[in-house]
Amino acid sequence: MTAPETADGNRVLVVDDEQALTRALAINLRARGWDVITAADGHGALDAAAHKDPDIVILDLGLPDMDGVEVIGGLRGWTTVPIIVLSARTGSDDKVEALDTGADDYVTKPFGMDELLARLRAARRRAIPADGESSIVTAGELTIDLARKKVARAGSDVRLTPTEWHLLEVLVRNAGRLVSHTQLLHEVWGPAYGSETNYLRVYSAQLRRKLEPDPARPRHIITEPGMGYRFEP
């Protein structure tokens, strides 16, 4: 029997208008110790998120009253709760739009329960610092708040897109270690991505322009040619 999840940070909001799927997910998640809230449409999702304070949201894009991307945008107006999109849409444009709007991960239907549970655990690890780990990282002029998903440079807030933040977050959580192209693509864009290194070049360049004193001679976001990237505090 699978061991229950730990109690902290285990309230999950499942948003899907397929009643059979929602019921099956709720049964499986509750059996593993998750506190499950459900909603069948976008307005119900936004209301539940506002009043029941979920730790993670699992969201279908094809809702009856509004597109799931609108729900992501609504949530991102006031909360940084991790959002895992669960959708039958397989096009890369849909995935990129959802991730750029603020989703943290994308799981394509049909899916395996073990895969979804692994994504939930990963999202919760990113959202909650480990015991003894500070959520504040300082690097030169930069102050990076992993819990609040905010960056300041020389005391001034820096506005990052959701994708820029996600890329920076993965690098910062692996500070001093090489993160491969494949790992970055999987973490930021999803498991269907593995060879689109041009995405990494574009977004790392954007981060350097916003964060580095001299983007042409980066101190923090370092390229390891042919291998990946490394964040140096």
Image (spheres, rainbow, N blue to C red):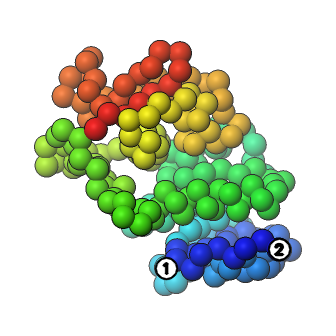
**Distance from the alpha carbon under mark 2 to that under mark 1:** 29 Å
For the point 71% across and 37% down, the residue is 192
Q: Nearer the viewer, residue 42 or 22?
A: 22
Q: Position of residue 180 (x, y in %)?
A: 55, 29
Residue 157 position within the rendered picture, expressed as x and y whole percent measured from the top left: 21, 49
Tally the numbered discs: 2
194 lies left or right of 18: left
Which residue is disc 2 drawn over?
1
- Quarter in which the C terminus is drawn: top left
Where does residue 171 sit, x and y in percent of width and height? 43, 39
Mark yes or no: residue 72 visible.
no
Q: In the rendered structure, which disc, 2 or 1, sits on the residue that comes first in sequence?
A: 2
* Percent of width and height locating residue 134: 32, 60
Looking at the rendered structure, the kind of residue marked 2 is Met
Q: Nearer the viewer, residue 98 or 181?
A: 181
| Residue topped by disc 1 | 53
**Which residue is painted at 25% across and 18% down in the image?**
217
Q: Residue at x 54, y 35 (%)?
A: 184
Per the image, label 1 sits on a secondary structure element best described as: loop
